[in-house]
Amino acid sequence: QQQVKQSPQSLIVQKGGISIINCAYENTAFDYFPWYQQFPGKGPALLIAIRPDVSEKKEGRFTISFNKSAKQFSLHIMDSQPGDSATYFCAASKGSGYSTLTFGKGTMLLVSP
Amino acid sequence: NAGVTQTPKFQVLKTGQSMTLQCAQDMNHEYMSWYRQDPGMGLRLIHYSVGAGITDQGEVPNGYNVSRSTTEDFPLRLLSAAPSQTSVYFCASSYVGANTGELFFGEGSRLTVL
């Protein structure tokens, strides 16, 4: 049973465009929703995260939108740049006091110059 | 600024061989974990530990053993490697306590089993 479903699997966006990656979760006990960014040959690194008590969080060009009733959240990358080309993972965790994250399958983003 | 250090970065094994992937962190994190990353499968949790002497299974534990004798180290052992264990393995750590969701990952160990 896949607890966090992520789409699309891959995405090509032109420089300056908006990249949108969507995730849906099943477990209503999840209460923390981070996004990780991974460059080739590197480990994932935390990009931005949200808790379900807010509907949106913005950090620079990156925004998370959260819809608790639909059990969905999404990452928007505004003014996408070639340097944003990476694999993005959404994830979710329960309030257990440590970070046992359940990850989506990832989205490979390519921003064309 | 070492963070999470994994060794080796690359390894080729023959079916049936054993080996240990090493992971060390210098951030005094209580929580450590091992994930495997396969194409189209995302990151799947193998084993994790919330402190020295405490380990637990994740989503895909079969074929792997772990131990946690110190806060800093969390080795992953493959007792009899199989081709299905060909993957990229990531060690990650974090603080225990308030759930921040922030895991700190190593750079990975790429394992090929022939």
Image: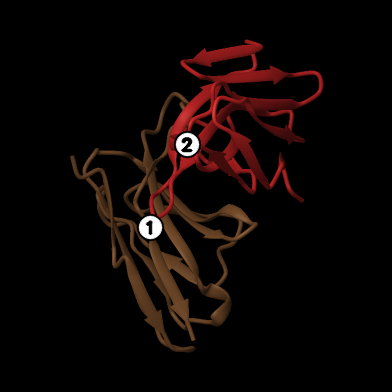
Report the amino acid beneath label 1: Gly
- Residue B93, picture quadrant: top left
Mark 2 belongs to chain: A
Q: Position of residue A103 (x, y in %)?
A: 60, 43
The correct choice, above or below, for B27 with respect to B39 in the image is above
Chain letter, colour brown in render? B
Which residue is located at x 48 percent, y 38 percent?
A37
Which residue is located at x 70 percent, y 32 percent?
A22
Q: Secondary structure at mark 2?
A: helix
Report the amino acid beneath label 2: Pro
Q: Nearer the viewer, residue A17 or B98?
A: A17
- Residue A82 shows which numbered tag? 2
Which residue is located at x 53 percent, y 28 percent?
A80
**Crowding near the residue tagged with mark 2, few <14, some 14–19, many ≥20 C-alpha atoms within 10 Å:** some
Chain letter, colour red in render? A
Q: Secondary structure at mark 1?
A: loop
Please count the marks in the image. Answer: 2
Tag 1 residue = B108
Q: Is residue A29 left or right of residue A111?
A: right
Residues at marks 1 and 2 on the same chain = no
Q: Is residue B41 left or right of residue B37?
A: right
Q: Residue furthest left?
A: B1
- Residue B55, picture quadrant: bottom left
The answer for how far apart the CA atoms under marks 1 and 2 are is 24 Å
Q: Is residue A14 left or right of residue A41?
A: right
- Residue A56, picture quadrant: top right
